[in-house]
Image (cartoon, rainbow, N blue to C red):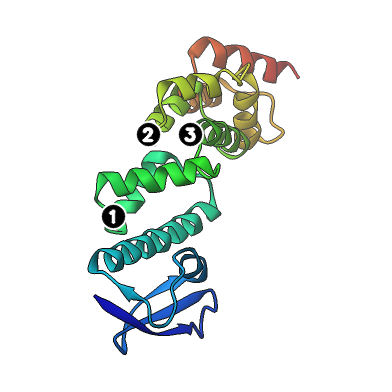
Amino acid sequence: MATITRLVQGKKNPNRVNLYLDDTFAFALSIDEVAKNNLKKGLELSQEKIDQLQDTDQNDYVYAKILNFLSFRPHTIKEVHDRLKKYEVTDPTKQQLLIDRLTSKGYLDDLAFARWFIASRNAHRPRSLRMLTQELKSKGVGEKDIALAIGDVNDESESIRRLLEKKLKSQHTLEAAEKQKIYAYLGRQGYAWDKIKDVVKSWESE
């Protein structure tokens, strides 16, 4: 058993409390955890309880880091799993607890990610549905979520037109060699030949 001899509010982070056991600094906890566990000076803690508190604090620390990771842009569950490994959280049970916590709060949603990813790609770097599907699969999004997100896209013609606008600006008359290059370029983005042909034809007629 060890006895709590001091509880000191953190100077850099006032929401943290430094815990001293037998006059020696042991670890820090959030104020919420201190209140939740009714920790106070003179309270004796078993080694099991100390381990539990330290484990909880480590989980909260990693959780905060993941929230910061997610604050820049949405991520998939697979990407968060990979990030947890970088934070040296390798235990599958601990990983899943953190994932469940993030999911329940709405911070992780693969379907929402897929819809955001497609909208972002179509706005800035248009891709065919086939290439978008491949990219989403590489990020760990499941087939069901991909199918639902892809189903929101009614027609690839608009994304092809955006690529033409980016590539050709206001030019609408194409020489044979230029047209061949455009066809090859759009083909590399994964669009079907017939769809490319229809959109380019419409483009030239304007």
Taking depth in this image into account, of 147 and 171 the one nearest to the observer is 147
* Residue 140, disc: 2
In three-dimensional space, the C-alpha distance between marks 3 and 2, rounded to whole angstroms, equals 9 Å
Residue at image coords 50%, 52%: 70
- Quarter of the image that includes the C terminus: top right
Q: Residues within 10 Å of mark 3 (few under 14, many from 20)?
A: many
CB within 8 Å, label 3 to label 2: yes
On screen, residue 196 above or below 24 = above
Residue 117 in the figure: left or right of residue 95: right
- Direction from residue 58 to residue 198 in the image, left or right: right
Q: Residue 159's mark?
A: none
User: Is residue 144 positioned above or below 79 on the image?
Assistant: above
Whether tag 3 and tag 1 are in contact, CB under 8 A, the answer is no
State the residue at coordinates (62%, 29%): 164
Q: Amino acid at mark 1?
A: Val
Task: Provide the residue designation for mark 1.
Answer: 89
Q: Which residue is mark 3?
A: 110
What amino acid is found at the position of numbered circle 3 in the picture? Asp
Find residue 33 and report its horizontal and vertical position in percent: 46, 65
View extreme (right): residue: 206
Q: Is residue 88 visible?
A: yes
Residue 1, percent from left and from top:
24, 75
Q: Give the residue displayed 46% in from the left and 78% down from the top.
A: 17
Most distant residue in the bottom direction: 23
Q: Residue 161, how many percent across, how many down?
A: 64, 26
| Spatial CA span between label 1 and label 2 | 19 Å
User: How packed is label 1: few (under 14 Cα within 10 Å), some, or many (20 or more)?
Assistant: some
